Amino acid sequence: MEALDVLLNRVSVPRLIEPAPDAEQREILFGAALRAPDHGVLRPYRFLTVEGDARHRMGELLAQALIDKGGDVDAKALDKARNGPLRAPLVVVVIARLTDHFKVPKKEQVITAGCAAHGILLAAYAMGIGAVWRSGDLSYSRHVAEGLGLTGEEEVVGFLYLGTPQNPPREPAKPEVADFVSAWEG
């Protein structure tokens, strides 16, 4: 697939089934992540793969984080949290590893981790692998971070769900570029 086709037509694919990407495909996916723009070459990211029964344990972790937030938590919300990781055969947790650096602020390091996640999504699309980036309140929960083994200087950037597309990818919307670009005249 041509690079510009990937950049102009990648879409999220939320309906995913087995099989998950194989070892060779994962090598390419993570290799694409390692090409993210990276001021200072800090490589301020790492990834966890969650599959098989570990997806159930991740679902329990998310449900407990929802309970720990307090307030009224209904059964439907708990089920959604528990079943979230089961929506794909492979979940990749994208983690920003933040360090104090004289030249590279932590905000830039988080952006780099986000670019690494985007690299995985682009590579997945190019190989015909279905992928969608999910986040939300629970992805930023300290309980979830600790349950996943993150240190105090790490944070979840998002969860990438990967697998075989259940349906062909949808046609992407084509917004007008001019709606998002303007000249600054100083």
Image (cartoon, helix red, strand yellow):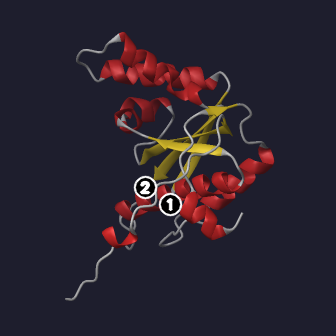
> Which residue is denoted by mark 2 in the rendering?
98
Percent of width and height locating residue 41: 54, 70
- Count residues near mark 2 (Cα–Cα under 10 Å), then give few for <14, some for 14-19, many for 20+: many
> Which residue is denoted by mark 1 in the rendering?
115
Question: Residue type at mark 1?
Answer: Cys
Percent of width and height locating residue 83: 51, 21
User: At x 62% / y 65%, what residue is drawn?
Assistant: 5
Residue nearest the viewer, comparing 148 with 20: 20
Q: Is residue 20 left or right of residue 40?
A: right
Going from N to C along the chain, the mark reached first, 2 or 1, is: 2
Q: Is residue 103 left or right of residue 54?
A: left
Q: Using the image, determine if residue 88 lies above or below residue 101.
A: above
Q: Using the image, determine if residue 8 lies above or below residue 125.
A: below
Regarding mark 1 in the picture, which secondary structure is present there? Answer: helix
User: At x 25% / y 19%, what residue is drawn?
Assistant: 70
* The N terminus, quarter of image: bottom right
Which quarter of the picture shows residue 91? top right
Regarding mark 2 in the picture, which secondary structure is present there? Answer: loop
Q: Do labels 2 and 1 touch, CB within 8 Å? A: no
Residue 180 appears anywhere in the view: no
User: At x 71% / y 37%, what residue is drawn?
Assistant: 20
Percent of width and height locating residue 115: 50, 60
Q: Using the image, determine if residue 174 lies above or below residue 25.
A: below
Residue 174 appears anywhere in the view: yes
